[in-house]
Image: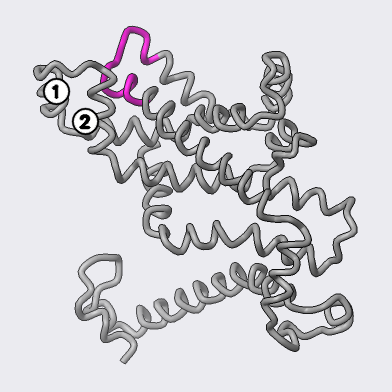
Amino acid sequence: MFFDKYRKKEDGTIRYYDLHSKRTKILCIFILVICFGIMIVSLFPPIWVFLASFKDIKEFRKSATILPKSFDLQVYIKTWNDLKFFKFYINSFIVVVGSVISAVVFNGLLAYGLAIIKPKGYKIVYGLVMWSLLIPATTSIVALFVNINKIGLNQSFIPLWLALGANAFYVILFKQFFEGLPKELIEAAKLDGCGLLQTFARIILPLSKSIVMVVVIFAINASWSDFLLPYLVLNGSGKETVMIRLFMFRTSNATNVEVLRAVAFSLIPPIILFTIFQKQITEGAATGALKG
């Protein structure tokens, strides 16, 4: 029976003895049907993109079927080489690596000061961090771009790294986690002669691997899919990322099918990331909702 697995279920709202009620069984089936429908709606667009990208331009325009006539991986290899996608992948990976390091180090240090060191005026700083969550990021993009040009960092990866190194949401995640760490270990580190930075690097970060992994996953996804700031900073520099390359197709001679294959290339890393770290992503979202 489908409901037999509930015999060993130890958590959740519905337990096995609840299923003696026919109404509860119907409710369970109804919820499962809704979840299955949501899954289909969510997965259909990327699946359609992947399947349609195997078609040639004639089949794409005339055929109404989802499945292509053949699955030839050579068309993907040809598109990859023709569009020189390797260069844009490398640029995106450079942005991702620098952004992840900045997100962990800078946001972690600020949260370390707010949660552990607590200098005078830290409540004001924390209030400003919380207040900044109310401001949409796009409202400051003009001022940010102007200042980047003034200090001569345009057409460089550095502004993109630093921009993600100032994320209020990551600061909140770090702060809430740091406040739950055993204070005895921090005091012991001070007695052993560790300075503030040594305590952060040798004690705080090793004890915070779970929240660091959550921030890393969020940072990878955010930096990989970001378009506006990389477009403003890197456009015309030869350092364009994958997302900028997709936008450039509007003025290129690429066919619709080649654009679909390029979109499929851009979807592969986030899909792999979510597949591997699905549990950490959902736990991180729950942590931000409950503690933030």
> Residue 183 lies in what quarter of the image?
top left
Query: In percent of the image, x 74 and y 75: which residue is there?
Result: 52
Q: Earlier in the sequence, mark 2 or mark 1?
A: 1
Q: Which residues are magenta?
A: 111-123
Question: Spatial distance from mark 2 to mark 1, Cα to Cα?
Answer: 8 Å
From the top left corner, tell me how far across and down residue 287 is, in percent. 36, 45
The image shows a total of numbered marks equal to: 2
Query: In percent of the image, x 28 and y 39: which residue is there?
Result: 208
Amino acid type of the residue tagged 2 in the rendering: Ile
Amino acid type of the residue tagged 1 in the rendering: Ala
Query: In percent of the image, x 32 and y 33: which residue is there?
Result: 176
Query: In percent of the image, x 68 and y 34: which residue is there?
Result: 229
Rate crowding at label 2 as few (under 14), some (14 to 19) or many (20 or more) other CA atoms within 10 Å: some
Say above or below: 230 vs 42.
above
From the top left corner, tell me how far across and down residue 139 is, in percent. 69, 27
Question: Cβ–Cβ below 8 Å for labels 2 and 1?
Answer: yes
The quadrant of the picture occupied by the C terminus is top left
Residue 274 shown left or right of residue 64 in the figure: left
Q: Name the residue that disc number 1 marks.
A: 189
Q: Name the residue that disc number 2 marks.
A: 203
